[in-house]
Amino acid sequence: MVKPVILNAAELPGWAHEELHALFTVLDLPKDCADARAFLAQHGPKVRGIALRKTPIDAAFLDALPALEIISSYSAGLDNLDVNAAKARGVSIANTSHILSDDVANAAVGLALAVTRDFVNADAFVRAGRWPQEKEYPLARSLTRMKVGIVGLGTIGSAIALRLAAFGCELAYFGPSRKPVAMPYFDDVAQLARACDMLILTCPLTPATHHLVDAKVIDALGRDGFIVNIARGPVLDERALVEALAADRIAGAALDVFEHEPRVPDALMRDRRVVLTPHLGSGTKETRRRMAEHVVDALARHFDVAGPRDAVHRVAGRGCAVES
């Protein structure tokens, strides 16, 4: 049986590459743009599937792959892919939002607690030997019964809402359309901000959501408000946030993503009201493994080839977890 030809445009663990090679004829996309164009011109017509991670794929890229049937993405966000162009060509798209939602939601709640309870600065206070020589550490804010607005109630946003409900938060949400949930809905993000003490950003990055949270929204949130961003950096107008912090028009922010990451503005680095993490929302060993497995499995299912998760036990040397 002739193996389907797959274009590898993803940096995956070594074992995942081995599994791809066992199931498919794998062509590795060159990293250099000029080499990639020549490569696609020569090999593109044979490619039926793509293993994707961060590689930008636009309409011109897709035009070079007339036989393409499926794109299997390691990430939840698809802002590096022209989704409309892919769908217009009848290309199936698989991503990992259902896999990473729990750990990203856990990270969002952790960031919400860190910024409201000031845990990072409190840790530094103890390590510097300032306790108990100095007076009591300043009181912080309680997440319990706080009014929290979720910007984007998809798979991840819903997982966050479930967790925050257990904290006793008063929840509301913004999105392109109303969901069948018992939660107040706002069709204007500034109005949501005005009604809340915290915004948690979970929406995908699209032209419509670029700088969705701008100076107007930040001002609507107010000087006692907080922002948590675990979506994509450009959803939040970073310059507007810096200006609001400098003018004390917002209480603080917790950011896992940045507009030009991995570059972080010096003003955010210096501001002790801001909690910074290096885009680690899904960064656990368990979830990252499942994400890589899903890249392979989605391709295997599409082409109806026997994948490694068809067996109960994993490949030797990778443990023997059972697929649920």
Image (cartoon, grey):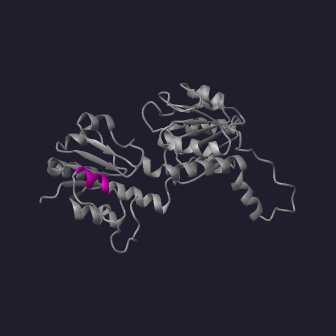
Q: Name the side, left or right, on which 212 lies relative to 37.
A: right
Any magenta on residue 93? Answer: no
Which residue shows up at 70% across the image and 46% down it? Answer: 116
Any magenta on residue 299? Answer: yes
Q: Name the side, left or right, on which 269 lies relative to 313.
A: right
Residue 65: image location, x then y, percent? 19, 44
Residue 100: image location, x then y, percent? 46, 51
Residue 90: image location, x then y, percent? 23, 37
Residue 270: image location, x then y, percent? 66, 50
Vertical position of residue 23 compared to residue 142: above or below: below
Q: Main secondary structure of the magenta part?
A: helix
Which residue shows up at 63% across the image and 50% down it? Answer: 275
Q: Do we see residue 39 in this rendering? A: yes
The quadrant of the picture occupied by the N terminus is bottom left
The span picked out in magenta is 296-302
Picture quadrant of residue 91: top left
Q: Name the side, left or right, on which 288 lies relative to 281.
A: left
Judging depth in this view, the residue of 310 and 104 nearest the camera is 310
Judging depth in this view, the residue of 166 and 270 nearest the camera is 166
Picture quadrant of residue 77: top left
Which residue shows up at 50% across the image and 60% down it? Answer: 284
